[in-house]
Structures are given as C-alpha cells and as structure tokens.
Amino acid sequence: MRFDRENQTLSRWCCELPAPMSTPKARPSQTEHTALQRWFPRNWRDHELLDSGAGARLERFGDLVLIRPEPHAIWDRGMDLDAWKRMAAAEFMPTGRTKGQWVPHQSVPDNWEIQYPLVTGQTIHFSLEFTRFKHVGVFPEQGNNWDWVAEKMGPGKRMLNLFAYTGGASLAARAVGAEVTHVDAIKQVVTWTRMNMELSGLDGIRWCVEDALKFATRELRRGNTYDLIVMDPPSWGLGPKGEKWKLEDQIGQLISATAQLVSPGGSLVMNTYSGLSPSSLENLWRTVLPEARMEVGELCLESGTGQVLPTGSLLRLERP
C-alpha cells in the first residue's frame, strides 16, 4: 500500500480505491511560534567547563577545579573518573536533597575572585566561596545574559533585577551607566552583591531586601516602569518575613505584574532552573504580551570534551 502525494489517493499495487473522504482544513495558527535557541557565554577566561557526565560536572573557576552534581548530565564522562579526581581541588558531596558539604582534595581558600569581560569593554568581578547548596556565587552560563544586558543598557536607562542573587546582571547594567534596582529576599546575598559591586569599581546600585512579587506589585501601584526587567525566579523559597514562594502557584501573578512594569519599547529577560520548558515560558508570556517579539531557548555551557550542557530555560522579549 502506498500514498500518492501528487494525486492525493490511496492505492494498493495498481488497483485504485475510492477517493478518501475530504477532511476539514486546519485552522491557521494565530501565533507565529518561536524557534528554540541555545545561548552560550563566549567571553569567559576565568571559567571553563572541562567535562560533564555521570550526573556531575568538572569545571574551573579561576585557578580552582571543582566537581559538582549536575542532574542534567545523564551521559558518560568524556574523561575517566580518576582524571577528574586528580584535577579537582574540591568536590561537593550531597547530604540531602538540596544541601551538602564540600570535600577538599587539596588546600583551598575560603574565598577567591574571578572576572568576566563584557562585550562592551568593561569587566565585572565576583567574589566566590563554597556554599552548602553546591554553588560558589556565580552561574557561569549567565555570561551570555550579562553581555545582552550590557548592550541593551546605558546612561538614562532603568533596570530592575528580581531574584537577583549575586548580581551579574546588575553589575553589567551599572557598568554601562544604567540606573539599577536590585531585589533579593536574602540579606546575605544582597551583601555579597554589594561586595561584587565594590570589587568591580562600581557604586550607586539601589538595594532592596524584599519579596520580589510584593516589590513588583508595589511598583505597579506607584506607576513605575523600567526599560529592562531581569528575573530568575526559583522553584521555591522564603521571603525576608517568611513569605512562602512556590513558582507553580505564583508565576501567573509575577508575570502579570512585571509585564505592566516594562516600558513601551522596553525588554525583559526571564530564566528559570525550575524545569519549566522554554515553550511553557513563551505560552505564559504570550497571554499577557501577545504582540511582544520573543526569543526562547536554553542557556547552555559547552564542555572541553564536546558535550552541550543545558542549564536552564530562557525567554527574552521586547515590547512594541
């Protein structure tokens, strides 16, 4: 049996069958769907993903090579485990679902510094340290976002950074002269970002230790808008006053509020490590800003052994 595309009939050998029943035409799509993309940081000198696989990643931060868990790395290592162990200065060992401890394989400092050169010519600095959540104070894949932010911002522009962590996007925007408001619910993290600002030779960032959704809602009542909003909402968390944050329950409110804070002609970046797909992000934002131009995809790192490590979903949009 074969299907003759040219004549739109079904035939078996040379015997023709009755013409198939006509089917209703598909309704044309009302939305031009966005092709998924991959974004990689290109300017790192102080970070390198050396290898990944078997649920872990081997990477260099400055002079220190570290081993950390990586649930996305379900493939085999490019190097053998003995090579990893010989290279690593320390390894993170989980003791629970979200916490653990660093086990040194050699002498390591309590903290150290790395730099990222922006495409616009400035350099931003980060103070790193070992935390009990496997992180060291920077998400290196975000370098692509920092460059994008630096190219979008400049003197007279206003940026709001929500769930801002240690502030790479805040530093990038401030380095090119933008007015920056940095919001995070954890006071210690805001203090950490202030240190990064000073290491970068910058000043003038506005700090807010507050629940991001509450801050956005209040800014909406005040009638404030921003030329760029950057946000990286976590799956769950607690605000400074014990406010509970659960992404799946509150993402609709967050998107509704922040959509109205973007100035006409302004931009927004949203990424998440929560497991939400890029297409899910696009669908959510299309409901509130259907006319916006959008890009969606994954933030990725490429290893020295050839793998592409996906790290999180990313959406960028520009309002008309």
Image (spheres, grey):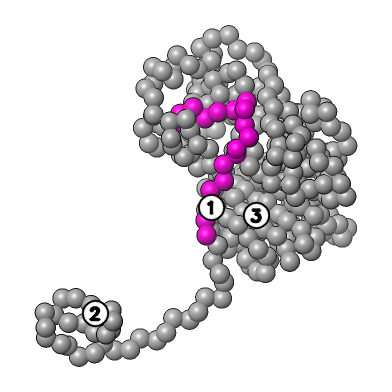
Against 19, is 78 above or below? above
Question: What residue type is disc 3 on?
Answer: Arg
Decide if residue 75 is in sight here.
yes
Which residue is disc 2 drawn over?
4
Q: Looking at the image, is mark 3 or mark 1 nearer the viewer?
A: 1
Q: Which residues are magenta?
A: 35-52
138 left or right of 81 in image: right
In primary-sequence order, the first of circles 3 and 1 is 1
CA neighbours of label 2 inside 10 A, class few (<14), some (14 to 19), many (20+): few
The amino acid sitting under disc 1 is Gln
Quadrant of the frame with the C terminus: bottom right
Camera-near label (3 vs 2) is 2
Determine whether 84 is above or below 37 in the image.
above
Please tell me which of labels 3 and 2 falls first in the chain.
Answer: 2
How far is the residue under mark 3 from the one under mark 2?
43 Å
Image coordinates for residue 179, horizontal then vertical, percent:
85, 45
Q: Position of residue 227 (x, y in %)?
A: 80, 54
Answer whether residue 51 is magenta in the image: yes
Determine crowd level at label 3: few under 14, some 14-19, many 20+ residues with C-alpha closer than 10 A: many
Quarter assignment of residue 264: bottom right
Circle number at residue 37:
1
In-image side of 239 versus 41 (left or right): right
Location of residue 217 in the rendering, given as x and y in whole percent from the top left corner: 79, 56
